[in-house]
Amino acid sequence: MKAFEIMEDLFSLTSPHDYTNTCDTCKSGDPEREVTKVATCMFATPAVVRAAAEWGADLLITHEPTFYNHMDQKVDEEQSNQKRKLIADTGIVLWRYHDHPHFTKPDVIVEGILNKMQLPADVEWRGELTVTRLRLHTPMTPVEVVRHIEEHLGIKHVRICGVRDVPCEKVTVTVGAIGSLVEQELYREDSEIVLAGEVCEWSFCEYTRDAAQFDRKKSLLILGHVGSERDGMIYTAELVKKRHPELECRYFECGEVYTYTD
């Protein structure tokens, strides 16, 4: 099976949307290449590219940009060229898979997170892009939710803004960096705990801190971009394998972008 045929099959799962200016394009390699091994990742870091090549991947599907901006345009020409050469030298076909999974119903990335997180809750509503509202079976405090997330998603540190020890029932899941949609959920009177990948601290976090100091039941949990979405790309590898059992499929971990002292 050729690389472009695998991608077209994944793209066929999406809901109607205008993909005229999509970032989901081939970034390197020959789309006609025959594929027997498919790798997926969150970010195609040099370490991930090398590991996937060593494994023998023909196609590497990445969720996020490889060259530091949404459309993968050069920002630092020397480093961008160095990375392009690294990828080209492996012969791997590198393809972005970002817009299509987020506009699939249900969102492919969110499904991966929900499956892995196993939060004891029911899905009450699925909205624009990644926004998904849950209702917990039994009220949990934000601290309890964080401990559950860190255990199940393997995130080193989830940051907590706002209330910590007040039992809540309503959890909104957002992933990645969706800005205004996180803001809308925070401002919604009915929201209690909002999960996010990365956010604007001076705005969203300070709003949530003030809300807690006004005795409002409001908490913002920040998982980090990789931590909030990587299980969606693990799920993507499983999805490709399910649809094409003749292919070997594997997820390659890039790790969180931050390191810690312990």
Image (tube, rainbow, N blue to C red):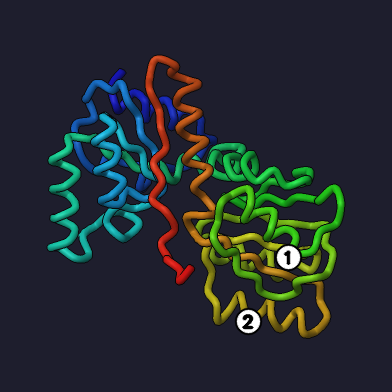
Given residues 151 and 2, the one toward you in this image is: 151
Residue at 66% across / 68% down in the picture?
220
**Distance from the alpha carbon under mark 2 to that under mark 1:** 18 Å
Image position of 27 with respect to 175: above or below: above
User: Quick one: label 1, few (<14), some, or many (20+) residues within 10 Å?
Assistant: some
Give percent across and percent down for residue 141: 79, 64
Give percent across and percent down for residue 57: 28, 31
Describe residue 146's horizontal placement relative to residue 19 as left or right. right
Tag shown at residue 206? 2
Amino acid of disc 1: Val
Q: Earlier in the sequence, mark 2 or mark 1?
A: 1
Tag shown at residue 188? none
Describe residue 196's horizontal placement relative to residue 88 as left or right. right
Numbered disc in front, either 2 or 1: 1
Q: Quadrant of residue 113?
A: top right
Amino acid of disc 2: Glu
Residue at 81% across / 51% down in the picture?
136
Secondary structure beneath dot 1 equals: helix
Residue at 85% across / 57% down in the picture?
139
User: Quick one: label 2, few (<14), some, or many (20+) residues within 10 Å?
Assistant: some
Tag shown at residue 143? 1
Residue found at the very far front of the displayed protein:
262
Given residues 68 and 255, the one toward you in this image is: 255
Whether tag 2 and tag 1 are in contact, CB under 8 A, the answer is: no
Q: Quadrant of residue 59?
A: top left
Give percent across and percent down for residue 124: 78, 46
Residue at 29% across / 27% down in the picture?
3
Image quarter hosting the N terminus: top left
Secondary structure beneath dot 2 equals: helix
Given residues 114 and 211, the one toward you in this image is: 114
Describe residue 141's horizontal placement relative to residue 183 as left or right. right
